[in-house]
Amino acid sequence: MSEISPIGQKLGNNSKGPKGELPFYGRRKGRPLRPQMRALFDNALPEIAVPQGLESLDGLFAHAPKDIYLEIGFGGGEHLSQIAAQAPDSGFIGAEPFINGVASLLRHIEEEELSNIRIWPDDVRLILDDLPSGCLAGAYIMFPDPWPKKRHAGRRILQQSMRDRLARLIRKGGKLRMASDHPIAKTWLLAEAMADDRFIWQANCADDWRVRPQDWPETRYMAKGVEEGRPSSWFEFIRK
Ligand SMILES: C[S@@+](CC[C@H](N)C(=O)[O-])C[C@H]1O[C@@H](n2cnc3c(N)ncnc32)[C@H](O)[C@@H]1O
C-alpha cells in the first residue's frame, strides 16, 4: 500500500534510490498515527518541508542562518530537536523516510517551539545532488541502520556515493559527526571515513570516541543500546 505525502511524494516500500543506486530498504510506516500526530503530519509538515529539487538554501529558513546542518535518519527527532534548540541562530535540515519518526519530530518542534528545522520526509539521497557545494556547516549520522550481514553491506548509509555527496556539500572546516553502538557498523563507519582523505578524524585519545561529547545529545537508539549493554562510539571528522 502506498499513499501520497503532504509534499507530494508517493510513500511506499522500497521506493527507488538515486539512479544506479540501491533503493531505501528501511521501514516507512509503523503503527497508524494517532489523530493528533496525523494532524501534525498533514498540516504542520507542508509548512516546513524541504521542497523537492531545491537548488539553493537561501530563503529556506526565515532567519537566514549562516550555518546549516543536516541530520540523516533522525529517527524520532530527539537528537535533532535538541541540537536545534541549542543553536537557534543555525538552521537544521532533517531527513527521515519513517513517517512515525517524522510525526515524532513534528511534535518536538511544536512542543519546544522550534523554528529552525526543515524536514525532508524521504530518502536523503534524493535531495543532496541538487544542493549547492559547500552549503553545509556539518552533517550528523546517528546510529545508522547497521546492516551487519556482508551481503547487505551495500545498504549501509556511508557508501562511497554518500561520502562524495557529503564531501561536496560540507564546507571546508565543517563537521561530519557519526555515532553507533553496533560493533560491525561502528568499525565499518570509522574505517570508511578514515580511508577518505577528505575527512580528518578528530580523536586524540580513546575517550574522544568512547565518551559522549556534552553537546551531542542522546538518541532513542543510543538509549536502547545502553539498556542492552552495547556501548556507543562517537566519531567526529572535519572536512579538509
Ligand atoms: C537505526 S535508526 C536511528 C534513528 C536515530 N538516528 C536514532 O539514533 O535514534 C536509522 C534511521 O535512519 C533512517 N534512514 C536510513 N536510510 C536513510 C536514508 N537513505 N535517508 C534518510 N534516512 C534514512 C531510517 O529510516 C532510520 O530511522
Image (cartoon, grey):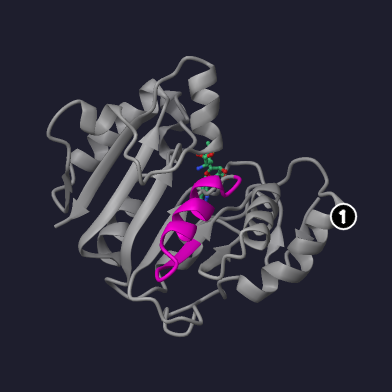
Q: Position of residue 131 (x, y in %)?
A: 39, 73
User: Looking at this view, is 239 or 113 the one in front?
Assistant: 113
Residue 164, image quadrant: bottom left
Q: Is 171 placed above or below 200 here?
A: below
Residue 88 included in the magenta stretch of the image: yes
Name the residue at 55% across, 46% down. 78
Residue 50 included in the magenta stretch of the image: no
Q: Position of residue 239 (x, y in %)?
A: 19, 56
The residue under label 1 is which amino acid type? Pro
Q: Under tag 1, what secondary structure?
A: helix
Q: Which residue is mark 1?
A: 35
Q: Position of residue 147 (x, y in %)?
A: 47, 30
Residues in magenta, as a range: 76-93
Name the residue at 40% across, 69% down. 90
Name the residue at 34% across, 41% down. 214
Can I make out residue 20 in this image?
Answer: no
| Side (left or right) of 175 relative to 125 | left
Q: Is 130 placed above or below 112 here?
A: below
Name the residue at 40% across, 71% down. 89
